Image (tube, grey):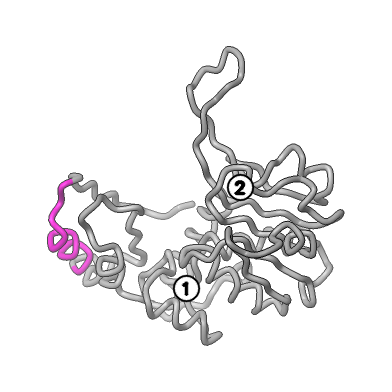
Amino acid sequence: AGMGSREHKMPEDVDENTLIDLIETLNQDDSVDGILVQLPLPKGLNSDRIIGKIDPLKDVDGLTEISAGRLSLGRAGLRPCTPEGCVILARYAFGDESLSGKHCVIVGRSILVGKPAAFLFLEQNCTVTIAHSRTKDLADVCRSADILVAAVGRPLMIQGDWIKKGAIVIDVGINRVPNTAKNAKRPTKLVGDVDYKAASHNAAAMTPVPGGVGPMTIACLLRNTVLAACARRNWPIPSSLD
């Protein structure tokens, strides 16, 4: 992508203050436009405290409290990459048709995907329902969706007959399960939250796992880095990113 990157590998037993010192050093480095902390962090480290030390202008993952606040208030800012990618995928799937008025059901309420995705789809004038594993009549709720975002973290939880004919299904789940296939090269495999094979009979379009949302998340991370660089340097935003 033509960007330079620096990888700072820390030992698993790194002291929290040492990690924070590194972040603050990068905050002060004018040659750095974006800072990303790879999650999850080892046990014993306070993720909220560490993420909170990132300069919001360099928060290319969109996870600081300031970034979250700007999103909830509808103000411009760096958006969380995976939820933003979900919106872009939905817009692409519907083509020239607007998302306005579409019913978007988000199964999952995490601060990484579910909650920010709700705000982002609201920005598209969708009618948004947030559901989760304890939602009553979850199958019926899912069947009402024009856009279904699965981000609950339970392998193959969402069945094929939960999908309305013609719906768009975006599977954010990444679950490792035993690989029971004959002559399997690996003992485990990755599956999503949706039963892909069964759901594909009803869905108009659906993301696979792996290889679906993940590449879009990376693309949005690169996009955020360009936006951060432009904002910090008062450069015009490339028209392709507007």
Instruction: Identify the residue position indicated by label 2 in the image.
Output: 193
Helix, strand or loop status at disc 2: loop
Determine crowd level at label 1: few under 14, some 14-19, many 20+ residues with C-alpha closer than 10 A: many
Task: Using the numbered discs, state the Cα–Cα distance from disc 2 to disc 1 in whole angstroms.
Answer: 27 Å
Observer-nearest of 209 and 153 = 153
Q: Quadrant of the rendered structure where residue 228 is? A: bottom left
Q: Which residue is mark 1?
A: 78
Residue type of the residue flagged with mark 1:
Leu
Q: Residue furthest front?
A: 136
**Furthest-top residue in this view:** 183
Of labels 2 and 1, earlier in sequence is 1
Contact (CB < 8 A) between labels 2 and 1? Answer: no
Who's the residue at 78% across and 43% down the image?
Answer: 200
| Residue 222 is inside the magenta segment | no
Magenta stretch bounds: 13-24
Q: Residue at x 66, y 42 (%)?
A: 208
Main SS category, magenta section: helix
* Residue 70 spot, x, y in % from top left: 47, 83
Nearer to the camera, 68 or 114: 114
How far across and how far down the image is residue 231, in percent? 43, 78
Q: Is residue 80 above or below residue 39?
A: below
